[in-house]
Amino acid sequence: MKVTGISCSPRDAATARAIRLTLQRLQEKFDANTRFHSLRGKEIRGCIHCNYCLTQGNGCSITDDMGPIYDDLSWCEVLVLGTPVYNGTLSSQAKALIDRTRAMVATNKYAFKGKLGVALAVGGDRNGGQEIALHAIIDFFIINHISPIGGGAFGGNFGITFWSKDRGASGIDDDVEGLRSLRRVLREVDKRYRQRHKPKEQD
Ligand SMILES: Cc1cc2nc3c(=O)[nH]c(=O)nc-3n(C[C@H](O)[C@H](O)[C@H](O)COP(=O)(O)O)c2cc1C
């Protein structure tokens, strides 16, 4: 299982901790091969709608820190995309990254097809907009033919949500419900991944 996890926070704090924990669990439990990106200190400019990607068919006209992220977005089978909640929705870093994937689908509209997607959101408040942020990520998954994985009917319904209480990484470690949502979603990732890779029955 090849997994790319991206923390779309400008800090190395709660969201990065939650993504690292998710990747660590996937490594330990499912022997996943993981790659991690943090947008902290990275220059990820917003899409300028120059249409270079459409007219030239040669990636993005902007030269910044997206390069290695494009590589690992292509490489992965499972994408874990995490954002802190800012004003009830995605961080601007998350939105910029999502919009810049247009350069990938401009040349191949099925560039993401077949991948599994896990949305993760971390809010400072208990109900600060985590689900709205999750849905913005899930919309991106749907538009790009990524199958969103939720935890099912009894926890982590739409993805992984944490309440950091604005305490950075330690807020993640102490959030029992958030950790539960993480476990439930990863269980479903494992099931879906296994279903897809089930050996074909011999005649
Ligand atoms: C500009 C800004 C807006 C924020 N808006 C919200 C919000 O609407 N809801 C919420 O629950 N937390 C909000 N927060 C708090 C962060 O979501 C919270 O501290 C989160 O854990 C930050 O993630 P990080 O530690 O990975 O940077 C906001 C923080 C900032 C900086």
Image: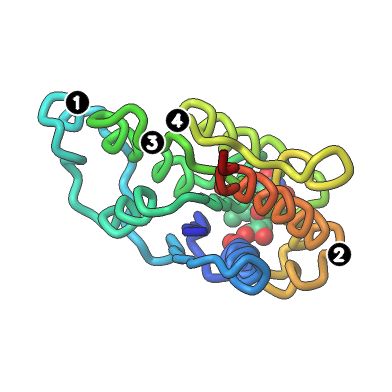
Residue found 14% across the figure and 38% down from its top = 58
Give above or below for 141 relative to 117.
above
Label 3 C-beta lies within 8 Å of the nearest ligand 1 atom: no
Dot 2: element: helix
Residue under circle 2? 176
State which image quarter holds ligand 1: bottom right
Label 4 C-beta lies within 8 Å of the nearest ligand 1 atom: no
Query: Answer yes or no: do the residues labelled 1 and 3 have beta carbons within 8 Å?
Result: no
Front residue of 63 and 86: 63
Lateral position of residue 101 relative to residue 33, left or right: left
Q: Quadrant of residue 116?
A: top right
Query: Answer yes or no: do the residues labelled 4 and 3 have beta carbons within 8 Å?
Result: no
Which circle's residue, 4 or 2, is located before the other in the chain? 4
Give x and y (percent) for residue 145. 48, 30
Depth check, mark 1 against mark 3: the one in front is 1
Give above or below for 49 relative to 162.
above
The amino acid type found where label 3 is placed reads Asp
Give x and y (percent) for residue 197. 55, 48
- Residue 144: give its label: 4
Q: CA distance from mark 4 to mark 2?
A: 32 Å
Q: Quadrant of residue 50?
A: top left
Residue under circle 3? 99
Which circle's residue, 2 or 3, is located before the other in the chain? 3
Which circle's residue, 1 or 4, is located before the other in the chain? 1
Residue found 48% across the figure and 67% down from its top = 33
Which circle's residue, 1 or 2, is located before the other in the chain? 1
Characterize the local packing of mark 1: few (<14), some (14-19) or many (20 or more) Cα atoms within 10 angstroms. some
Which circle's residue, 4 or 3, is located before the other in the chain? 3
Query: Answer yes or no: do the residues labelled 2 and 3 have beta carbons within 8 Å?
Result: no
The amino acid type found where label 1 is placed reads Leu
The amino acid type found where label 4 is placed reads Asn
Query: Which residue is at the far left?
Result: 56
